[in-house]
Image (cartoon, grey):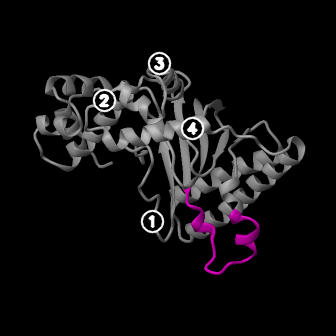
Amino acid sequence: MITVNRDRLLEEREHGDSMFPFCVYDVDYLDGQVIFNLHWHPELEFIYVERGKIQLQIGTKQYSLSEGNGFFIPSEQLHAAYPSSIHSPFKIYAIVFHPDLLRSFAYDLIEGNYLEMVGKLFHCELKSTGTVEEKEMLRILEMVIAAYMGKEITYELRVKGYLYILLGDVLKKQASLIQKEGPKQIDDTKTILLKKVLRYIDENYPKKLTVKDLASQIQMSEGHFSRLFKSFVRMTAMEYINTIRINKSCILLQKTDRKLLDIALDVGFQNQSYFIRLFKKQKGCTPREYKAKMKNSSC
């Protein structure tokens, strides 16, 4: 099974490769109590729910997505996904691609009239009970997933063709909404502030961090910051920092043979016992058990 890289908030990895910057990720299990944590990336993304029900967070807003429904997430949009219930099964697909995949070598009509608008797109929900256009977009998402997973000869051509249709439908849908309701007013002030804090955490997690340190990054009082952070991330700042540290330790456990104490210190824990206890709480196994499981896994 392909899984989402959860260790980094601003994703810096390449989805697919430079010749075909496209990938489909399927996720049907929880990492702790989330499907994937708050993050953002320069790529465009479609979410498709094949089974169950999830809660999708886009910036400050929450959306409930049921089986057969989808969602379009524009570039640089902060987003996360959570189960509707810890005990409810689900399966989602995340279709992630860079707009460069659709560009031509020469500046043409497609680039000038449409692809230059990619940075101005806003998110939108795709409902199986919605318009004819939404139903068609969901059908095409299913075709994209099938083509990518099957990887039959010429699948890249078909995927790229489907993406042109989907992007065209997104632009048409959003133009229609603007005509009916006027330009979207997006208040992203809080999102910008939160991104700054999350980036700071990602760059400084090995160090001793306090709520005061984080609040000072965006000139807020500790109380105001703590309320803002928890309303976005669904955990306290210190809980989030420890989640990042545990995820970073997973990489070291997989890729190195370093001692547990050294790994704990490298990711910001000063106490090995606390590191092991928190690791087991988050991952359901000890660091040694995790390392053995990853070594024996073919994933």
Quarter of the image where one finds residue 277: top left
Residue neighbourhood size for the residue with mark 4, other residues' Cα within 10 Å, grouped as few (<14), some (14–19), many (≥20): some
Residue with the mark numbered 3 = 223
Location of residue 91 in the rendering, given as x and y in whole percent from the top left corner: 53, 37
Mark carried by residue 222: none
Q: Which residues are magenta?
A: 97-116
Q: Identity of the amino acid at label 1?
A: Asp
Cα–Cα gap, marks 1 and 3: 43 Å
Residue drawn where x is 44% and y is 50% of the image: 11
Up-down relation of residue 133 to residue 247 (above or below): below
Q: Secondary structure at mark 3?
A: helix
Q: Earlier in the sequence, mark 4 or mark 2?
A: 4
Q: Is residue 115 magenta?
A: yes
Cα–Cα gap, marks 3 and 4: 18 Å
Residue 151 relative to residue 243: left or right: right
Residue with the mark numbered 2 = 283
Cα–Cα gap, marks 2 and 3: 30 Å
Residue drawn where x is 58% and y is 45% of the image: 77
Q: Earlier in the sequence, mark 4 or mark 1?
A: 1
Q: Secondary structure at mark 4?
A: helix
